[in-house]
């Protein structure tokens, strides 16, 4: 936890030193308007959490209660905050769901299907947004796709990587799952991959289990999972829209302007998608003020960044610091003790 916090503090320090403008900061009116929009942003963050819980509950076959799903989403977000965004938290959740005694097929489906859906949200959404708004959507002042600066160049490279990664998952998971097992089985036998052969072969089996679980579901299952995914990601970006309006009340709140800001934020996230830092710590705080500089004066962009990261990132670090130790105690430490083993065996004998 210390690493992402330290990176975030360094990024904020850099922003304070180079960009913070005290005079512009004093122009912020901390009125009912500002606190109302900040409150709405918090509410949207809670809604986003419920969308994730809906997706998790559906994809695991409703075997977990709503309360358990809300708890597991905290663990998922906490693990994502502590790992590079290029890796994320899915494989931590593979361990967590296994410890929750979820069936192997549902565990694999929960991990791989959510990976496919999360990537698919951006793969499908971005071309539509680019058709609507053009290159100015990618970065303030960008007039042409030929303007291959750091932001636009990174965007196209990252999108290409994400598209390739998504196609592979969709093909192996939804179209030809048997190919996944055969291909990964073949790779596991290559001499230069000998060190990871067992893991690669296991991955192939997990793909097949996930595919079997997904293919036997009805349309309502897929609809709920897609609604959960779209709702969660949309909430993530709309929350920042609210914070911008709170800090800069002169920001037009018409649908066209807010939709364009939303599109810009989606593009920003693509650029950050393969951040090497835990949860994008440091990079996110530095990136947001630049990406919204045509709506938020650069001297106070730091305020929006701090509000956003304080709620959606550091908030989950704090929640995780409370939830995760309790989960570890209940699901790992107690299950290892002799007393808990006897209790578990007794419950099994009693038909629980």
Image (tube, rainbow, N blue to C red):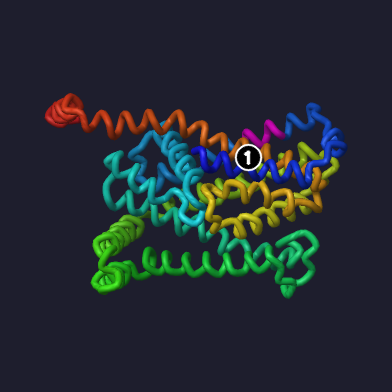
Count of numbered marks: 1
Q: What's drawn in magenta, residue-wise?
A: 38-43
Residue 6's x, y, as percent? 57, 40
Residue situated in front as seen by the camera: 85 or 159: 85
Residue 302's x, y, as percent? 73, 42
Residue 212 appears anywhere in the view: no
* Prevalent SS, magenta region: helix
Residue situated in front as seen by the camera: 140 or 176: 140
User: Residue 40 in magenta?
Assistant: yes
Residue 67's x, y, as percent? 42, 31
Relative to 168, residue 336 above or below: above
Q: Is residue 123 left or right of residue 345?
A: right
Say what secondary structure mark 1 lies in.
helix
Residue at the image point whose x is 75% and y is 43% from the top:
17
Residue at the image point whose x is 52% and y is 61% from the top:
120
Relative to 152, residue 16 above or below: above
Relative to 31, residue 205 above or below: below
> What residue is disc 1 on?
9
Residue situated in front as seen by the camera: 188 or 295: 188
Give the quadrant of the C terminus: top left
Residue situated in front as seen by the camera: 306 or 215: 306
Residue 154 appears anywhere in the view: yes
Residue at the image point whose x is 28% and y is 60% from the top:
199
Q: Residues within 10 Å of mark 1 (few under 14, many from 20)?
A: some
Residue extending farthest to the left is: 349
Residue 328's x, y, as percent? 34, 33
User: Residue 34 in magenta?
Assistant: no
Residue at the image point whose x is 69% and y is 52% from the top:
262
């Amino acid at each position: 936890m210390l690493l992402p916090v330290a990176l975030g503090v360094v990024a904020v320090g850099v922003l304070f030193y180079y960009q913070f403008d005290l005079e512009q900061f004093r122009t912020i009116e901390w009125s009912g308007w500002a606190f109302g929009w900040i409150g709405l942003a918090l509410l949207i963050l809670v809604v986003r959490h419920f969308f994730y819980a809906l997706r998790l509950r559906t994809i695991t076959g409703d075997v977990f209660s709503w309360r358990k799903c809300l708890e597991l989403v905290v663990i998922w977000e906490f693990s994502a905050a502590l790992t590079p965004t290029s890796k994320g938290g899915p494989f931590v959740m593979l361990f967590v769901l296994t410890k929750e005694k979820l069936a192997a097929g549902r565990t694999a489906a929960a991990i791989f299907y959510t990976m496919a859906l999360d990537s698919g949200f951006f793969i499908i959404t971005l071309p539509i947004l680019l058709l609507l708004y053009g290159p100015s959507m990618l970065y303030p002042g960008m007039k042409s796709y030929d303007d291959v600066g750091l932001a636009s160049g990174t965007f196209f490279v990252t999108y290409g990587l994400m598209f390739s990664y998504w196609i592979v998952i969709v093909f192996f998971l939804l179209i030809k799952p048997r190919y996944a097992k055969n291909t990964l089985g073949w790779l596991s036998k290559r001499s230069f991959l000998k060190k990871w052969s067992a893991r690669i072969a296991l991955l192939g089996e997990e793909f097949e289990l996930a595919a079997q679980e997904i293919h036997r579901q009805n349309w309502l299952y897929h609809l709920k999972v897609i609604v959960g995914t779209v709702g969660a990601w949309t909430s993530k970006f709309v929350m920042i829209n609210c914070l911008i309006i709170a800090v800069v009340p002169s920001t037009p709140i018409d649908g066209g302007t807010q939709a364009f800001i939303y599109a810009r934020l989606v593009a920003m996230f693509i650029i950050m998608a393969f951040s090497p830092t835990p949860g994008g710590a440091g990079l996110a705080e530095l990136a947001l003020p630049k990406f919204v500089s045509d709506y938020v004066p650069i001297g106070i962009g730091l305020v929006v960044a701090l509000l956003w990261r304080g709620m959606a990132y550091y908030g989950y670090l704090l929640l995780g610091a409370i939830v995760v130790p309790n989960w570890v105690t209940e699901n790992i430490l107690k299950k290892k003790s002799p007393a808990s083993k006897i209790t578990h065996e007794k419950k099994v004998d009693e038909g629980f």
